[in-house]
């Protein structure tokens, strides 16, 4: 307790004398930034996940071809889970001598559990509905009215039951756009279903049992029910059952993690610099303590306890400020985010506190160990400085802490290894190059003017320190560049894959003799469409003669794909938005080859050269895996798990599928197409697309503001880092003024020195960021990499401007103060 009291007294003295101002400020900013970003990212992720649940109209959905056991519903009731039920089937509607193949959806009174419906009644105003149609009424999509020559208030016959058409559906949260959904939609109350008489034994029906409630109860229910599911039943998930949305959310979550990493990296750099300044200014005091009998371990505990106390106080202050910061940020974004925003999580605040202590430990402990090596002889020999800690300890501990935090934020080991590996490799290589460049620059000194000579000498007189500062500023600028570029490319990638004319309708079951005519009709109506793909319905049954049921794991993507028929197609050319990740595309003459989608191949452990056995009807055939493909599910174009080489599926009957964009004003064209091609099914996914574009717009706006916050925090900490390294420059400036240098001369040398420092740092930041962007895009985020040539001009100039301004601002008092006062203060 005596030593701890001494530590507190020394800490209080240093705080009053200003010794810990920069260190405390850097730590508070670090914790404030990381806590605010952590809270913001956590709330935004949970908000978007909750909103994404609206795409399923529930938190958890069980899809089944039949009703589920009553004890399952009883278990959900015991866990206080809200329940709803929907079932979907196709039926032909006949009114006014017009026929229409429609998708009937019967909903219980509690539907939807998440989200809402939008309809238009007798008036033109769209209204929000939180329950489905009442018994005796039906809600329909607009095309049903035009196709069957009906108006609101007319009677619609569904099977044997006449229902009043009371509303037009304009928004349906859980409308699926896969091959098992039918459109246009007719929604009825589940209490009217039996009276329709449509469903008979053997009818093809899809049941969806929906549940919502507390996350712990949902987890328990999920864990309890999974072992009881039969092969035809499954639990639906937003990432698997809505891959176009799940892909966007996954990328957004990774970007939010990257933004958090940006603040942590910048904060770590500032803390390391501030700690080094603090330690160097305590060499003399430590030497005196050593002369008074303090041992090395006692010195370490003395100063270590000070840092622990400082860390606790600064982290607590930072968490409090971070809480208010993210609250203010959400207040500013209230018009851009969903109405229901998730409440702040105490776990995120606690994690921000842990981050503060971890970052302080990782970046402050290695310099702190130098105090342990201070020799008592320093009392007599001021130039006798302790040896620095070994490089592996300094960089290993800091890198380990950052690596753990990156992994925690992204939950992606591959991304963590990519960032750390590429970043450290680039820093090591560039550090050597910087040192060589500075050594070479010495030859320029005799040929420069006096001001430029002194400005450049500021970097050259201590090459090792200059290399460290340049790398530190490079790391800070790299983090900012990465945050900005990834954000820009992410948003551009979303906008490119979902332009204003993205396909919003699918046409299925187009017979081969109708394909050319259907395509011509689209062209005559000036409708933009995608490729026409031939489709054969088949099932994967074996891999290398081993039944697939013995290979697939429970509740995996592979199980879902193998328990139903797949849409098999063939193509001579590699489709758009598909990339080969293993193997190669086939030559023209090759048959019996198949290309498999990457995630399905991983789930089923399919490798290049494997022999896959398929059944089509009563016939079987084999194909060898020639390539593994990565594809984009969020393009609203036809996508396939299996693509075969031309000629492989010629023996089987096929139909065609395509997608096209149809504006709202041309909706009536669908009726003409369906009449002309009665066997063709048209799926309207414009409502789904509208939902998707809405959530992407919200994510884009939130990411924009998150970027601005990260950049502001980065520039603030950058200034703290610059100010923390100014002691030696302050001392040298005072000496130069003593020897006759005027203020204008000193200002010019400071501008040149810091501008050169920022210029070199900016140039290196571009090199590091381009290397990391290439690795991230090609290996982790699976986005197209494009070199950002404009950065080669912007980043160095930005670095020179901001580092130069921050440095000159930090030394402004040195220029104005009398040299004698500065020397006495030192």
Image (cartoon, rainbow, N blue to C red):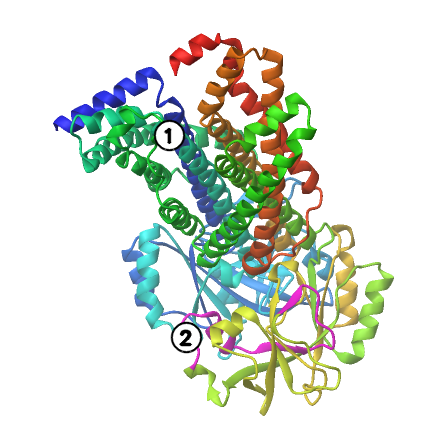
Q: Which residue is mark 1?
A: 318
Residue 431 horizontal/vertical position (percent): 53, 45
Residue 703 horizontal/vertical position (percent): 56, 41
Q: Residues within 10 Å of mark 1 (few under 14, many from 20)?
A: many
Q: Nearer the viewer, residue 802 or 655?
A: 802
Identify whether 308 is placed above or below 51: above
Marks 2 and 1, the one that precedes in the sequence: 1
Instruction: Tell me the quadrant of the picture where the N terminus can be found.
Output: top left
Residue at image x 75%, y 56%?
662
The stretch of residues the image draws in magenta is 551-580
Instruction: Tell me the quadrant of the picture where the C terminus can be found.
Output: top left
Q: Is residue 209 visible?
A: yes
Residue at image x 41%, y 75%?
553
Residue 543 horizontal/vertical position (percent): 50, 85
Q: Let me know if residue 680 is in the magenta part.
A: no
Q: Nearer the viewer, residue 715 or 126?
A: 715
Q: Which residue is mark 2?
A: 553
Helix or strand or loop: what does disc 1 sit on?
A: helix
Identify whether 38 is placed above or below 819: below
């Amino acid at each position: 307790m005596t030593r701890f009291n001494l530590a507190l007294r020394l800490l209080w003295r240093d705080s009053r004398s200003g010794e810990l101002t920069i260190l405390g400020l850097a730590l508070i900013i670090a914790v404030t930034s990381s806590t605010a970003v952590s809270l913001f990212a956590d709330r935004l992720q949970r908000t978007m996940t909750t909103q994404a649940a609206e795409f399923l109209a529930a938190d958890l959905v069980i899809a089944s071809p039949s009703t589920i056991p009553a004890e399952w519903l009883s278990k959900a009731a015991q866990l206080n889970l809200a329940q709803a039920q929907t079932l979907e089937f196709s039926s032909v509607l006949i009114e006014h001598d017009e026929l229409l193949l429609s998708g009937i959806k019967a909903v219980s009174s509690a539907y939807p559990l998440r989200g809402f419906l939008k309809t238009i009644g007798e008036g033109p105003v769209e209204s929000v509905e939180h329950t489905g149609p009442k018994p005796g009424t039906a809600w329909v999509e607009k095309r049903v009215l035009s196709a069957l020559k009906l108006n609101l208030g007319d009677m619609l016959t569904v099977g044997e039951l006449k229902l009043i058409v009371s509303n037009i559906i304009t928004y349906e949260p859980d409308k699926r756009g896969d091959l098992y959904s039918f459109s246009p939609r007719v929604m009825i109350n589940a209490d009217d279903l039996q009276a329709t008489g449509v469903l008979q034994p053997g009818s093809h029906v899809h049941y969806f049992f929906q549940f919502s409630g507390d996350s712990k109860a949902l987890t328990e229910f999920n864990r309890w029910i999974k072992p009881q599911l039969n092969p035809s039943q499954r639990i639906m998930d937003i990432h698997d059952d809505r891959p176009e949305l799940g892909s966007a959310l996954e990328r957004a979550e990774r970007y939010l993690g990257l933004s958090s990493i940006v603040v942590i990296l910048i904060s770590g750099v500032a803390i390391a610099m501030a700690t080094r300044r603090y330690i160097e200014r305590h060499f003399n005091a430590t030497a005196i303590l050593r002369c008074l009998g303090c041992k090395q371990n006692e010195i370490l505990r003395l100063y270590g306890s000070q840092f622990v106390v400082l860390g606790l106080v600064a982290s607590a202050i930072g968490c409090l400020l971070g809480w208010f910061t993210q609250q203010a940020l959400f207040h500013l974004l209230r018009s851009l985010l969903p109405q229901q925003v998730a409440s702040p999580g105490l776990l995120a605040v606690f994690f921000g506190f842990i981050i503060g202590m971890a970052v302080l430990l990782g970046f402050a402990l290695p310099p702190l160990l130098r105090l342990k090596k201070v020799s008592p002889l320093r009392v007599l020999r001021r130039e006798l400085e302790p040896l620095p800690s070994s490089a592996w300890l300094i960089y290993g501990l800091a890198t380990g802490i950052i690596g753990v935090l990156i992994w925690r934020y992204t939950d992606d080991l591959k991304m963590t290894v990519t960032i750390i590996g590429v970043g450290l490799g680039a820093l090591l290589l560039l550090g050597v190059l910087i040192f060589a460049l500075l050594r070479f620059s010495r030859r320029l000194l005799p040929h420069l003017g006096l001001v430029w000579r002194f400005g450049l000498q500021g970097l050259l007189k201590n090459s090792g320190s200059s290399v460290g500062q340049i790398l530190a500023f490079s790391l800070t600028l790299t983090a900012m560049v990465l945050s900005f570029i990834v954000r820009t490319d992410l948003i551009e990638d979303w906008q490119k894959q979902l332009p204003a004319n993205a396909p919003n309708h699918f046409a299925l079951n187009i017979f081969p003799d109708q394909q050319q005519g259907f395509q011509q009709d689209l062209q005559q109506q000036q409708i933009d469409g995608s490729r026409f793909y031939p489709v054969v319905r088949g099932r994967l049954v074996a891999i290398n003669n081993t039944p697939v049921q013995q290979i697939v794991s429970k509740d995996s993507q592979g199980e879902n794909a193998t328990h139903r028929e797949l849409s098999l197609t063939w193509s001579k050319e590699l489709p758009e938005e598909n990339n080969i990740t293993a193997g190669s595309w086939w030559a023209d003459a090759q048959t019996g080859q198949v290309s498999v989608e990457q995630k399905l191949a991983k789930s089923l452990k399919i490798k290049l050269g494997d022999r896959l056995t398929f059944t089509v009807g009563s016939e079987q055939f084999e194909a060898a895996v020639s390539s593994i493909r990565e594809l984009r599910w969020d393009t609203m174009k036809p996508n396939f798990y299996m693509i075969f080489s031309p000629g492989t599926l010629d023996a089987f009957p096929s139909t065609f599928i395509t997608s096209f964009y149809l504006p709202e004003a041309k909706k009536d064209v669908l009726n003409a197409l369906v009449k002309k091609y009665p066997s063709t099914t048209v799926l309207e996914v414009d409502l789904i697309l509208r939902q998707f574009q809405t959530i992407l717009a919200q994510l884009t706006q939130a990411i924009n503001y998150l970027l601005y916050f990260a950049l502001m925090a980065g520039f603030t900490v950058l200034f703290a880092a610059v100010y923390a390294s100014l002691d030696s420059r302050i001392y040298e400036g005072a000496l130069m003024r003593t020897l006759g240098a005027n203020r204008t001369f000193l200002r010019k040398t400071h501008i040149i020195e810091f501008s050169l420092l920022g210029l070199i740092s900016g140039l290196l930041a571009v090199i590091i960021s381009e290397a990391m962007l290439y690795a991230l895009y090609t290996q982790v985020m699976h986005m197209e990499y494009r070199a950002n040539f404009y950065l080669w001009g912007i980043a160095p100039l930005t670095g020179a401007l901001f580092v130069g301004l921050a440095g000159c601002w930090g030394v402004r008092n040195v220029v104005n103060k009398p040299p004698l006062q500065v020397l006495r203060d030192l």
